Amino acid sequence: MSNKFRVNQKVVYPSQGVGKILEVFERDFKGEKTPYYKIYIEASDMVVMVPVANAESLGIRQIVGKDDAKAAMELLSEEGDPITSDWKLRYQMNLDLLKKGTVKDIATIVRTLYNRSKVKELPILERKLYDSAKKLLIDEISIALGMSEKEVENQIHLKLEPPGAAPKIKHAVIMEDDEDDDLMDDVKEKKGSSDEDGDFGDEEDFDDEE
């Protein structure tokens, strides 16, 4: 199978962040030579190794072009769908979007959770998901448009909260009962397992470089 990415190319690993291809190499796996990408993930200062054959199924892709980057930024200021107060459904839907990992999916997560935060403060798990999606969006857009991360962050804020615009708290809530409090109880029960809460990837999909 031919390599889709080249050494030193910047890529997006949706559940991990923006990374850089350090090396394309082969490892013995069950008696066969298997090509791997060695990718440095800047946000977490981590190196992962991903089989070339699995890269597409994991959503690993190249940085988008300027047009797609601008379209994602415009999406931030568009009106979104009604937001459910069922945190389990809401969290899973956004987590699935993050794993798909297109730049529009990531922008949708940022918009949805930001708007939700204007209704009620986000619980811990969703805040982590929002922060991860926002960081990924900032990193990719800054590369695509040749802007600093600070400039992109400021532009994102302006798109989410245009000067003089009415506060975005008008989205309908589908469920009658807000279930965020149940999430906080669930988090308390799992106290001490914060590493699991913050992991949005599948550990079996990659090996950490030692």
Image: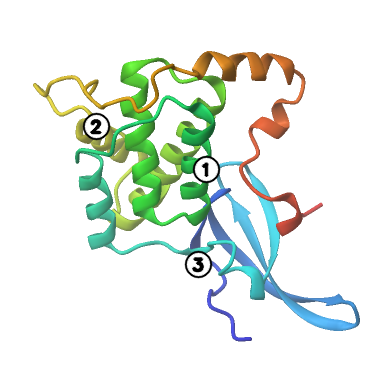
> In terms of sequence position, does the residue under pointer 1 or pointer 3 come before the other?
3
Residue 21 percent across, percent down from the top left: 58, 65
User: What quarter of the picture does the N terminus occupy?
Assistant: bottom right
Q: Secondary structure at mark 2?
A: helix
- Mark 3 Cα-neighbour bin, 10 Å: few <14, some 14–19, many ≥20: some
Residue shown at 56% from the left, 49% from the top: 15
Dot 2 alpha-carbon crowd within 10 angstroms: few under 14, some 14 to 19, many 20 or more: many
Instruction: Look at the picture and state if 176 lies above or below 78.
Output: above
Q: How is the image coloured?
A: rainbow
Q: Measure the C-alpha gap from mark 1 to mark 2.
A: 20 Å
The residue drawn where x is 77% and y is 20% is 192
Name the residue tied to disc 2.
160
Find the distance from the CA under tag 3 to the CA under tag 2.
30 Å
| Residue 115 spot, x, y in % from top left | 31, 27
Give the alpha-carbon distance from disc 1 to disc 3, as whole Å: 26 Å
Q: Which residue is mark 3?
A: 9
Amino acid, disc 1: Leu
Q: Which mark is residue 95?
A: 1
Amino acid tagged 3: Gln
Q: Where in the figure is residue 175, as x and y percent of width and height? A: 39, 24
Which amino acid does the dot numbered 2 rest on? Leu
Residue 206 visible in the shown view = no
User: Residue most toward the bottom?
Assistant: 1
